[in-house]
Amino acid sequence: MKKLIAVDPSTYSAIDINPRKQPNERLLALADYLKLSTLDRARQVVLLEPDEDIDAVFEAIGEPPIIALNFPNFFDGRPFSTASILRQRYAYEGDIRAVGAVRVDQLEQMYRCGFSSFEIDDDPLSNTLVSAVQFFSYHYQSMISDSADRHACNSHNTAKPVPGP
Amino acid sequence: MYQYDQFDQTLIEERTRQFRNQTQRFLEGKLASEEFQQLRLRNGLYVQKLAPMLRVAIPYGMLSSNQLRKLAHISRKYDKGYGHFTTRQNIQFNWPKLEQVPDILEQLASVQMHAIQTSGSCIRNITADPLAGVANDELEDPRPWAEIIRQWSTLHPEFNWLPRKFKIALSGSDHDRAAIKVHDIGLRLVRQQHRTGFEVWAGGGLGRTPIIASKIKPFLEKEHLLTYLTAILRVYNRLGRRDNKYKARIKILVKALGANAFSQHVESEWLTLKNSPDTISETNIDRFRNCFSKPDYLDLVDESISNDDIPESDCQLWLKHNVLDHKMSGYAIVNIALKDIGSAPGDISAAQMDLIADLADTYSSGEIRVTHEQNLVLADVRQSDLITLWHSLTTAKLATANLGLISDVICCPGGDFCSLANARSIPLAHAIQSQYQQIQEIVDIGALDINISGCMNACGHHHVGNIGILGVDKKGLEYYQISVGGDAGEQTQLARILGPAFPEQDITQAIERLVQCYRQSRLPQESFIQTFNRIGIEPFKTAAYPGTTA
Ligand code: SF4
């Protein structure tokens, strides 16, 4: 069983969005999605595979409210870059959904690259989701979802040195 | 050296907690072993032939004396009382227990150390010139930049699941002591019209398909370093092959696209990234530079050590081979060779670690550097202390005067420890070191790098050895393929294979025939590699296989 969860960016709290899922909402492969009329597209979610060229695809799909990126296995890192590109290059503001082999240990990385909802196994471990998404207090990179006070450069200038090493 | 602030410290402590939780879930059967494998690798933990192996990061090879003492303590408490320095400036412990690894990481964190990203398909520990800051041919100290890259690459969310491992090396001198052209990305500090920037090389690497990197950008302004690296990594992460792990390194991508097309991909990716928040401000550059300020050097003059002061000929040789010029007058750079016969190249006992830490405090700036030749460096020794220091080192068997000479063998752990090996490499290193013990002979042979790898993965960097030895498997027997003419230095070049592989018992004779070939063919003052470059491989082939027509 899978369940769908989103993270509220202002509080980092998890919101279970299963109930809000539309009754007929399905994930559609790109080719099938492109065959739909604009009206029908609005009711479906396009699912992109990691080898699809996001630059070519983004224009073709218009700006749907949800883009799902598939993780064919948990060590395929391409969707991380795809999400970053969607947010950075195309300033895409819709929901980027992680589906497929999505693991709790990777949620923070996904979130920081711009993913905003996650389809994960419905098991007790997944309830650690909230802490997994904001596990680290600080980050060295300035990713799209990182609030400025958690950036390395900003924090370094105010942090106190630790004696040693 | 770089000192953590609360921010850095919090981050590694949290990483340790996260890893403890992952290990616990695995031990309780709540985390599948193929998932835990990937997670533990990203924290330096392998499962080897005999036991787990933990690889600890030594960023750009810099250690404080307290950190070295902590490594000694860890090796006593959790291992068998020794550690092994690798060709990538890291240290490995070969016998830790899986369930104790989180405790080891906690100990490391207490001295600002970690094992983050020392293995797995992610950005590995950043390596740099071990003589950074003290070399007299240096344009700019590369360490502030290495630290900036270390931080940027640590737990980078986008690049933790790359097609394959990714290694970045950095040099700030004309003479390349960081082998930047055999790295996935090599950076060299250059100056253009009084501005500092980087020459960017990409797509180099050893392993199964050795390739020398291509220059993809002649000048990158320093403030754009991280956004440009992001662009390279993003192109690689998206386009690098994932269907075949032997074709997954960036070198294969650069080669397949061609260096020009690859660099165009990077440039167009960079368009969106340039000037984004990872652009480095002048304030931050200054902050990192200040972290590597010079020690308080005294105003000294160069000393000439008279022969009467030198106790014995061994010391004289040590002064000649292991001591290098420092950029400050009155100071010297001392190399400590971890190549004593009887222990594996790069191995160091806990007692030796403690001693070197003390010597670093007494005679140098309290810092130790690790070189990719698996030796250690005390970088700030006063010339007037050299002889006293030599006495202390000799007593601890740490004064082998063979830096850069034939018995300074570079060698991976090989079949004795590593489960990927085709053949053992340490016994071979010993055989070569035992064959060349006569110091007059070694000195007469002169500069000669021998590099040994136990398999194609090339951890011993055999492709860039003047003589490279690779373990191969022939119907279940250990054989060794010899290549000649590699060079890790300025003229980075790859060694060429001589011919059929040799059985173990024939290797030392084959090496001796190559050495004889060189000694007979050389011109005055010519080193092995210079002779090779002048006469080519044929004479060496003929010498290596007597009785066959080349
Ligand atoms: S070269 Fe091969 S045998 Fe040697 S350490 Fe690397 S993987 Fe192991």
Image: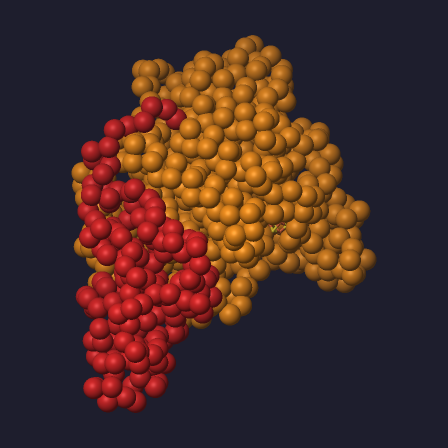
Chain colours: A red, B orange
Furthest toward the front, the residue is: A19
B118 and B383: which is toward the camera: B118
Measured from the top left, where is residue B102 in percent x and y? 50, 37
Furthest toward the top, the residue is: B308
x 21%, y 57%: residue = B274
Query: How many numbered marks, from 0 up?
Result: 0
Q: Is residue A60 visible?
A: no
x 50%, y 23%: residue = B69
Q: Is residue B251 left or right of residue B273?
A: right
B93 and B356: which is toward the camera: B93
Quadrant of residue B12 in the image? top left
Above or below B341: residue B235: below
x 56%, y 36%: residue = B100
Name the quarter where the C terminus of chain B is drawn: bottom right
x 48%, y 41%: residue = B20
Q: Is residue B421 visible?
A: yes
Measured from the top left, where is residue B544 in percent x and y? 73, 53
A125 and B104: which is toward the camera: A125
Above or below B517: residue B401: above
B514 and B433: which is toward the camera: B433
Name the quarter where the N terminus of chain B is drawn: top left
